[in-house]
Image (cartoon, coloured by chain):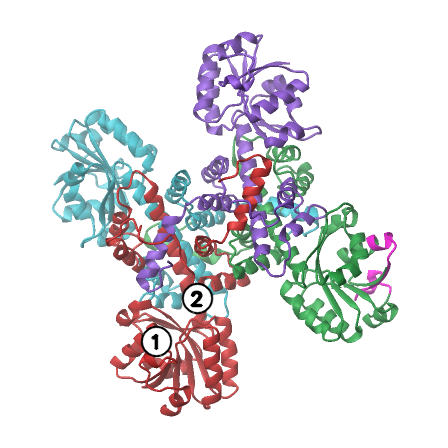
Chain colours: A purple, B green, C cyan, D red
Amino acid sequence: MQLGVIGLGRMGGNMVKRLRADGHEVIGFDLSPQSGRDVDSLEALVSALTAPRVVWIMVPAGAPTDATVDQLAELLEEGDLVIDGGNTRYTDDQRHEQQLSAKGIHFMDVGVSGGVWGAERGYALMAGGSLADYERALPIFESLKPEGEDGLVLAGSVGGGHFAKMVHNGIEYGMMQAFGEGFETMMRSDLIENPAAVMTSWRQGSVVQSWLLDLFARAAQDDPDLHNMPPVANESGEAKWMIEAALELGVPTPATASALWARQTSRGAGEDTLRVVSSLRAQFGGHVTK
Amino acid sequence: MQLGVIGLGRMGGNMVKRLRADGHEVIGFDLSPQSGRDVDSLEALVSALTAPRVVWIMVPAGAPTDATVDQLAELLEEGDLVIDGGNTRYTDDQRHEQQLSAKGIHFMDVGVSGGVWGAERGYALMAGGSLADYERALPIFESLKPEGEDGLVLAGSVGGGHFAKMVHNGIEYGMMQAFGEGFETMMRSDLIENPAAVMTSWRQGSVVQSWLLDLFARAAQDDPDLHNMPPVANESGEAKWMIEAALELGVPTPATASALWARQTSRGAGEDTLRVVSSLRAQFGGHVTK
Amino acid sequence: MQLGVIGLGRMGGNMVKRLRADGHEVIGFDLSPQSGRDVDSLEALVSALTAPRVVWIMVPAGAPTDATVDQLAELLEEGDLVIDGGNTRYTDDQRHEQQLSAKGIHFMDVGVSGGVWGAERGYALMAGGSLADYERALPIFESLKPEGEDGLVLAGSVGGGHFAKMVHNGIEYGMMQAFGEGFETMMRSDLIENPAAVMTSWRQGSVVQSWLLDLFARAAQDDPDLHNMPPVANESGEAKWMIEAALELGVPTPATASALWARQTSRGAGEDTLRVVSSLRAQFGGHVTK
Amino acid sequence: MQLGVIGLGRMGGNMVKRLRADGHEVIGFDLSPQSGRDVDSLEALVSALTAPRVVWIMVPAGAPTDATVDQLAELLEEGDLVIDGGNTRYTDDQRHEQQLSAKGIHFMDVGVSGGVWGAERGYALMAGGSLADYERALPIFESLKPEGEDGLVLAGSVGGGHFAKMVHNGIEYGMMQAFGEGFETMMRSDLIENPAAVMTSWRQGSVVQSWLLDLFARAAQDDPDLHNMPPVANESGEAKWMIEAALELGVPTPATASALWARQTSRGAGEDTLRVVSSLRAQFGGHVTK
């Protein structure tokens, strides 16, 4: 089917390739002239599409997505469908939907997982919106998702797609932290000769078999002690949002939160906490660490 | 090759089947006459094996394994090899080795993962001991492990096999907790219609693809809200040992520990902590929860 | 000085007594006729006060405080000062200030700690607002605070008072959890005869001397095992807000959060997490806990 | 009464002063000739004391204390009493008691809290042993403890004194972490002008009043941002022991453990965990933090 894609970065660009390979007519727009865009403005994109249009937004979350929705609310017409496939916070989806539905424009949010591997493996898609809109966009979803019966779900109403993706990322944080804690425990033990070899062996027959473990095996192949990797990790925001959502909903998330905090601490958070501890120890007679 | 197996319970019994199917000559012993044992005493088992013997212990950790090692230290001869495939704590392995090596008997510890699925999928094996002993027992390992290049590792010296298995189980705890936190967050949200369907969809294309997720999908098929499952979970001991080992080694394990504590709390732990909180709140004017 | 107080519940009523005992002219209003109110409407309260007025709000946070601010914005005049001494979330303070300042009405937020003991001990006060407003209300603060040099602070601009109080309550959660964990560890140990006696002994000479420990000693006097207290605790909301604020600010708060989660878990949170754990264990061969 | 004291370091030396000021006849021994010791060998110490003797050990835990007990078991006689006032792990106390009781020598363990302030404030004492031994040593305890009704307890049988002290230190860790988390949250917020001033104000009227808060106020007086303190803290071992004991006893200790882990992380622990996280993120397309 015909669709417009806004945002031709790494993710967007790969998705367009996958869609075109499956026979869809994609008209791509990006702010950058170097992006290989088909049209050079949103206006041109909208003109190039036949109504009722389908437009897929794949730009950074926050201000860029807000600005795109603002413009689309001006340019599109009743019956058109906007799909936000970026990493928008679920709380923004409802705002975007209201903005668009005031003009009769339909809206869906889709959480997309898969990273750079999605181009080849297919992307896991979690959609939020009405069943009718979902069915309308189904040919697109079918081309983006992996082959097989899984990898695509209508998670719930608008916001549900990004909520599901956010939870997915929170779980991913917890799993990575769990693997990390195990690896470090083995690294410190005299009993284990090659922790990376042990972990790699778990790729078959074990309970912890997983894609993350496969990726670990790849990463450790040439650097089994991971000494080329920095002991520092960024956060993407989604795990934080999940913990905030869980706090609001009254759900304890100690494993997920500990994963987030470990990353924050690796970038300097927690230092003032330790200054307090250190000050108090100095006051009651403990030695200050130099 | 020929080997004796002590302990023909669910795990041991399945392993014997897998070994025999692969052409090994297994002589099985179990305390229970209903076990389908081949001999009715340890003495008979030792007599039935040709020296140098290989004996695989598959009995409960702790006292039963200690008693078995005690007896084997009496019955076996120099050059024989004892393999403990049970869930023994790694700190006990060194004791067992010393006890046996005093008489020239070799010892290996092997952590075995795979549960009831191992019979069919093959077991992930983590061995601790010398390279020579490992190579001697390799035909057994090859038959027990899954097909493919992974699923078997010589993790390190004696104790290393059970240490690796212990860490494996700790990671498993953390992963299960992470999935649980994500599921509960979705269960509480109005935005998600069917949390189990969302999680099942992640089986393809997502970052959290894993065998545990496959098992979740199976479990949720007929009971998507998991209301037939109790909100209570036991612990097997190994995650606790891992956290203790990590404490000794100075490795923070917040995700693993939170998983253990959630299980302990589900069985009544933490209650006195809350009585203190509740008492203090009553004292400074908060209301006591009835 | 003259002031109006809105809300004559347990906290508000005690504060009025303390203010009157110190010579202030307090005109009290409450929705309930049984409250011992001086006037029976907000209109009457405003009429009874001489401009420029000072009005102290001491009603439940959220809708009741919002409604009170709405009405005061209508009734008060330029130069009047509204002080919110309730448990309002700091994020609402800025909204209230904007609402009032649009009409030239000044606003301060004051976090008040002290519970039922404040009537006698004095209340710890944390104020947010301008220095000029702080100095204007200082006679009130001086009468409410404990004798001595501490117990009162201008924490920062509007919102800062409730932010400080929120952090105070978060710390309180962590401290209570720490005492609870220690108590429970002693309760489970054969080595300690009377955990409550041990804790009570720490009231002098120890590093953990604190008012909370004094309250514990009181609570434990007639019930050393605390068996009359339920193993369940509510949350007041402020610790949750603190953790949310810390998440936004990138500050790890594992001790504070674990205290919140312990309380949530005591009231049924975390159950679906355990159903997942329990389901997975059942699938790979562990026994389901009955 | 007469007693020997072994170990005249900062703690031991201060305690001897306090005992002598109260009229006790103290004979002090230390390995160092610069310590101001009264005798230059354990043999001389034992000779100088009148049987039945009381000997107080105040040397570092572990090997030094073990060696001292070994020697005292040789030198002392039936009916003598050894008191270990150091930071010995409670699990070692029972071993020491058995060693000494084989020769009829009595044993007590006493946890001592108070740091450098104890000389002036008095020390909080937690004793483990028999009631008869406790009463025998009571004059010593009375002189060391603070004035007032608290500060001394017979916590339980042998080991109970150090167990109680260990739990005390665990609670202290949790409290310090809680204060630290609160301080850092305020440091990061624009709403709070001077976090140290806020915390200092809590010394009166608040729920978090405590000796640790008093010490914080002292520390922050000349360095309100604590920038002269390193964001690094050591651990003394006792919190780790408490968490291990709690693990064995099945008691969740998330607040205490998070405090320990924060300190460990400040000294480089957790780095391999983050290397795993960082490797996995690089593999699935996240950017590696430089």
Judge whether residue B36 is colored magenta: yes
Question: How many numbered circles does the render carry?
Answer: 2
Q: Which mark is residue C282?
A: none
Secondary structure, mark 2, is helix
Indicate yes or no whether the magenta region holds residue D133.
no
- Give the x, y percent position of residue A247: 46, 40
Of labels 1 and 2, earlier in sequence is 1
Compared to residue D195, the image places residue D79 above or below, namely below
Q: Which of the two residues, D58 or B7, is positioned nearer the viewer here?
A: D58
In the image, residue D128 lies at what x, y percent? 43, 75
- Left or right of A248? Residue D281 is right
Q: Amino acid at mark 2?
A: Met
Query: In the image shown, does D62 or B87 lie closer to the viewer?
Result: D62
Q: Where does residue D160 sit, x and y in percent of width and height?
A: 45, 72
Q: From which residue to which does the magenta span run?
A: B18-38
Question: Looking at the figure, which quarter contains the N terminus of chain C?
Answer: top left
For the point 32% across and 44% down, which residue is it? D187
The amino acid marked with disc number 1 is Gly
Q: Chain ID for label 2?
A: D
Q: In which chain is the residue bearing label 1?
A: D
- Where D160 sits versus A137, above or below? below
- Residue located 55% across and 55% down the image: B264
Q: Mark 2 = which residue?
A: D166
Instruction: Say if mark 1 contacts mark 2, CB within 8 Å.
Output: no
* A97 versus D21 height, above or below: above
**Residue B214 in sight here:** yes
The residue depicted at 68 percent of the width and 40 percent of the height is: B214
| Residue at image mark 1 | D12
> Distance between the Cα atoms at labels 1 and 2?
19 Å
Nearer to me, D16 or C198: D16
